[in-house]
Image (cartoon, rainbow, N blue to C red):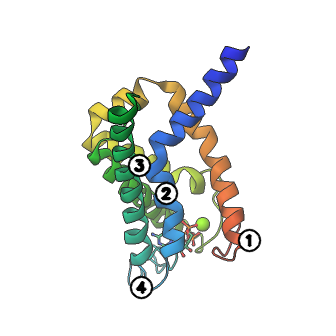
Amino acid sequence: MFEIIIYFFGTVILAMWLMLPAYIANPMAVVFGGGKPIDMGRKWYDGQRVFGDGKTIRGLIGGTACGIVSGIIQIYAVSYAASEFNISIVAPTLTAVITLSFGALLGDLIKSFFKRRIGFVRGAELPLIDQLDFVAGAWLLTYIFDPVWFTEYFISSPWIIVTVLILTPILHRLTNIFGYNIKLKKEPW
Ligand code: CTP
Ligand code: MG
């Protein structure tokens, strides 16, 4: 029983560690968001906005940058732990750091494109998709640009994938309720 609990928490912590750049990029887009929308106010052929006012240049750049900085700190922390304490911890590659961060916001952006196409106004809730869009984007881009790293830590450890898919909607919800309460976000989802 004890081993199972240790294994469970170990998997949760490892999953969060591997996803950290994406987990930072996504909420930081909310913090930095505002100003010019990415679609510059333009409409698609259906008369609806391409992405809408909820997807801004500042959010995209600020979120991606924060994710990348957090990933670079991870890389340094891992090499510090190895050289100073002889502890070996899983490290993301620089490529993975970039694709996890940018991929997260690209996934979120593509989701908004399809939300507008099916007539959902900016901010309308699309359960599960709103919570997992950034995971899909982060995974897809990382798989394309660093298949070796992605295969080693995600594809060959399906429990990490399952954990991320269950954990993310919970963390996302909690973060957004917090963001709503401190008046950073318009909706609690
Ligand atoms: N945000 C941003 N730029 C991004 C992503 C997010 O500025 N690329 C900011 C916006 O202020 C946005 C908030 O973060 O309102 C919350 O993001 P999200 O829930 O993804 O957008 P929504 O406003 O809900 O819009 P949508 O309906 O398109 O999902
Ligand atoms: Mg939303």
Q: Is mark 4 within 8 Å of ligand 1?
A: no
Mark 2, other Cα within 10 Å: few <14 / some 14–19 / many ≥20: many
- What residue is pinned by disc 1? 181
| Disc 3 from disc 4: Cα separation | 24 Å
Residue 122, located in which quarter of the rendered image? bottom right
Q: Callout 4: 10 Å neighbours few (<14), some, many (20+)?
A: some
| Foreground: disc 3 or disc 2 | 2
Residue nearer the viewer, 119 or 20: 20
User: Relative to 129, is 91 above or below?
Assistant: above
> Could you say whether the residue bearing mark 1 is in a helix, strand or loop?
helix
Q: Position of residue 10 (x, y in %)?
A: 58, 28
Which of discs 1 and 3 lies nearer the camera? The answer is 1
**Numbered marks: total:** 4
- Sequence-wise first label, 1 or 4: 4
In the picture, which quadrant includes the N terminus? top right
Residue under pointer 2: 24
Amino acid type at circle 2 is: Ile
The three-letter amino acid code for the residue at tag 1 is Asn
Q: CA distance from mark 2 to mark 1?
A: 19 Å
The residue closer to the viewer here, 141 or 43, is 141
The reply to whether dot 3 and dot 4 touch (C-beta < 8 Å) is no
Which label number is shown at residue 36?
4
Element at label 2: helix
**At label 4, which amino acid type do we have?**
Lys
Precedes in sequence: disc 1 or disc 3:
3
Where's residue 51, x and y in %? 45, 73
Query: Does any portion of residue 136 appear in the rendered image?
Result: yes
Q: Of the two numbered discs 4 and 2 on the same chain, state the one appearing first in sequence.
A: 2
* Residue under the point 55% across and 39% down: 164
